[in-house]
Image (cartoon, rainbow, N blue to C red):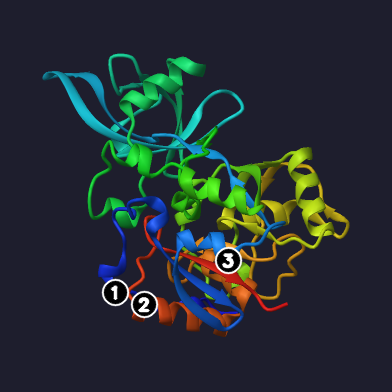
Amino acid sequence: MKLSDFDFHLPEELIATRPASPRSSARLLLAQGDRITDLRVTDLVDLLEAGDRLVLNDTKVIPARLSGLRHRESAQGPVSARIEVTLLEPKADGTWSALVKPLKKVQDAETIHFSEALSAEVVARSDGQALLRFNLVGDDFDAALAEAGAMPLPPYIAAKRPADEKDKSDYQTVWAKNLGAVAAPTASLHFDEPLLERLRAKGVSFTHVTLHVGAGTFLPVKVDNIAEHKMHAEWGKVSETAAREINETKAKGGRVIPVGTTALRLIESAATDAGVAPWEGPTDIFITPGFAFKAADGLMTNFHLPKSTLMMLVSALMGVETVKTIYSHAIASGYRFFSYGDSSLLLPRR
């Protein structure tokens, strides 16, 4: 298929820059096959049935955006340069890969100071990125980063406003647990504790998995033939408990519905013909039309960027023409798009 098959025009005013408040008051587009209904996220209590299972990504977003100073001696005396850093992922040797702007203003072995407590040495530079080694590790690093860092808002929000303190809670799920993501699993941002309690009382079950969402989730597809696209890899884990819960739900006839494309990609990475198996490691699964789903019976997800891999994923689940109809309806009805926007519950006709 061609990249143009997943394109659409989105009015600028439909890009959300703040989430709904309360979280669960956001709009929810229900698509059952080709039938569309306009609802609210709180209506999930009526839409889901006892015995259904929601799969939740419990990754925790780190405040990965840092602003610091590089100091250097020159013939004219001491000089400084403002350096902006976005952390991408930790490496096995304890360093972090990061986007550094402007990269030309730093050299290997130089130190960037982000706060009185936090600094990092530039270990190496290549391919527009840098490797950084911080002066702190473990809980000390987490605490200093929480103090100095800002949430790494998606480019389409960051272009409209800077991140602030409110984003540190808004851009985090209520069940976030395992630090490591630099982007939120945004469909999950619509859940609050009152909604979770109502779903539990209804008999809906929850399974937690971990996929650390990387900055690559925002990378554009640059090839016209989508089969030539190389998907970015992200680390994930499906525990033995999670695999067992999913398999038991399917065996009893319940529906397994991932909340967000990250949770869906992870359980499909772990899926076999015999069921979902425990799984840990990097996944670069690329789901496009024609993909045979083995684990997911539906998907709760926000509205995605044109020509993105996530548009291809929802088209694989629902069908290309159906997704075009869904998005046309969403735009005409004024749904809010992208990370802080409204959501949808996609239930394909089986």
Looking at the image, which is closer to me, 329 or 211? 329
Residue pointed to by mark 1: 11
Q: Residue at x 51, y 26 (%)?
A: 95
* Residue type at numbered disc 2: Ile
Looking at the image, which is closer to me, 198 or 75? 198
Point out the tag, 2 or 3, that comes first from the N-terminus.
3
Residue pointed to by mark 2: 331
Quarter of the image that includes the C terminus: bottom right
Looking at the image, which is closer to me, 302 or 217? 302
Q: Taking 121 as reference, is 16 left or right?
A: left
Point out the tag, 1 or 2, that comes first from the N-terminus.
1
Residue 200 in picture, x, y percent from top left: 61, 48
- Up the image or down, 45 lies above or below 327; here it is above
Q: Which mark is residue 47?
A: 3
* Residue type at numbered disc 3: Leu
Q: At numbered mark 1, what does the secondary structure look like: helix, strand or loop?
A: loop
Q: Residue at x 44, y 15 (%)?
A: 140
- Up the image or down, 105 lies above or below 42; here it is above
CA–CA distance in space, label 1 to label 2: 8 Å
